[in-house]
Amino acid sequence: MSKPTKTMQSLIAEVQKKREALEAGGGEARLEKQRAQGKLTARERVAKLADADSFEEFGLFAQHRSTQLGMADKEAAADGVVTGAASVDGRLVHLASQDFSVLGGSAGEVHSLKVADAMHRSLKTGSPFVFINDSGGARVQEGIDSLSGYGQVFYSNVLLSGAVPQISLICGPCAGGAAYSPALTDFVIQTRKAQMFITGPQVIKQVTGEDITAEALGGADAHMAHSGVVHFVAEDDEEALYLCRRLLSFLPSNNLTEAPRIVTDESIDPNPALNDVVPVDTKQSYDVRDVIAGIVDQGDLLEVQAGHAMNMVVGFARILGRSVGIIANQPAVMSGAIDIKAANKAARFIRFCNAFNIPLITFVDVPGYLPGVEQEYGGIIRNGAKLLFAYSAASVPKIQVILRKSYGGAHVAMSSRDLGADCVLAWPTAEVAVMGAEGAVEIVFRKEMQEAEDKAKTREELIARYREAFASPYVAAGRRLVDDIIEPASTRRHLARALEYLHSKRDHRPPKKHGLIPL
């Protein structure tokens, strides 16, 4: 007797049944366990990030081929990772979302190959790549094949670097070799429910005897404050996905295009409040973010690494709808002095903006590089040079605004005319000099100070004399190192005009494979 012939409808029903089973991941019980921990599932994260009904999945039916250590008969839905393409605010992105409900989201060979494939599709189409991490690590049962898969993901990260933006979301565990993929991406967003480390607390305890919790070792706050690995901290998955969407709104899709221009504030009228933000007395502190808020569209700054190296502020904003990268000394922290962490933070941000055609605006109020034995031993020479390298190598429009102090080598490092700034503006409070007047008089006028009868009065007179002769903005303007001295209230208008005329800037560099930043 012949077998009954299958109909198209029965075949379609079979496909649908298999699809539903695979989309259920590790099963409803495991998905509910994930939700009970205050986390979204892998597919819920994709749905929250992407525009409604825009996600197109690749590799739903992919399966591992491992036969050892009990894997022969073990099914793994989509091999533990959801991959595909979607639109976010109407723009194409490619993404991967690890599914912790399937084998703990462990990365086996096929799992990693799916991720790498999504990355290559991102590169081919010139679209950002978003990787949502939630994994127990390498799939031990697959041995070296698992490690090979990791290697292909890392290699793909480097291929994409500088060509399309890469954003990593850490929404669960991310341990061992898995942590190196986020480290190779442009931005890392970590939730407070996630931990990320190379070696966990147990291994550290066994090897070094140090006792530490997973949260203290690899939590979001630890990585923000200490390691600098994380760029944004989110309370939960929903905030992480919101931050990802917001970040993408400032970025171009790739290095051959420009960021979308979103005009929300077309006014360039003077802002009189800016005239009173910066104290004339250089010893008084203030929050430079108040200056930035008074200039950019809607006062909106998406600050990057807000809790790391807080003596330097970096982030994205808009001026007349154009995305700009903001770099600013923060006088409210360490008087705005540049230390190792601040130099690294700024240099990395500058290089990202340059790679993706985002103009740079630098607000300067800096007394110098931070002195100290710890800084010297830590390599302030090498790390401080990264800032010089990053600004010098940047070919995007570069605008410097000197708010107050701009002293010594730090003056040069903060996007000075000599490092290729296209436009340099100074407020009337600006002081451009080798060092502060107080320190300078001790060196320049040492003899007069020693011979003076009233040393305190003489010192004040000499400080005023030095400031008038060397530290005012007029000296720098006279040497054409400052283009204009402007009223603070009019800063937005000057920046808007400068961005307009610098829009077509072309900066030709010597032909070479790449420069060698002092790593």
Image (cartoon, rainbow, N blue to C red):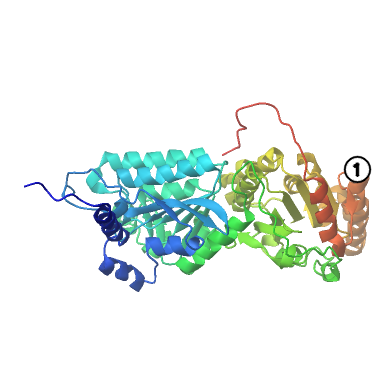
Front residue of 179 and 156: 156
Side of 197 where 296 appears, left or right: right
Horizontal side of residue 172 vs 412, given as left or right? left
Callout 1 secondary element:
loop
Where does the image place residue 463, in percent across and percent down from the top left?
A: 88, 57
Local packing at callout 1 (Cα closer than 10 Å; few below 14, some 14-19, many 20+) is few
The quarter of the displayed image where residue 297 is located: bottom right
62 sits left or right of 130 in the view: left
Q: Is residue 366 visible?
A: no
Look at mark 1 in the image and give the residue it sits on: 479
**Percent x, y for residue 352?**
61, 46
Question: Looking at the image, which residue sits at the far front?
Answer: 1
Count of numbered circles in the view = 1
- Snapshot quadrant of residue 492: bottom right
Report whether 32 appears left or right of 182.
Answer: left
Residue with the most extreme left position: 1
Please provide percent x and percent y for residue 374.
57, 51
| Quadrant housing the C terminus | top right
Q: Position of residue 19 (x, y in %)?
A: 30, 57
Of 101 and 490, nearer the camera is 101
Query: Between 433 and 321, which is closer to the camera in this rendering?
Result: 321
Whether residue 125 appears in this view of the structure is yes
**Residue at x 65%, y 59% (from the top left corner):** 311
Give 369 or 507, whichever is nearer the viewer.
Answer: 507
Q: Amino acid at mark 1?
A: Arg
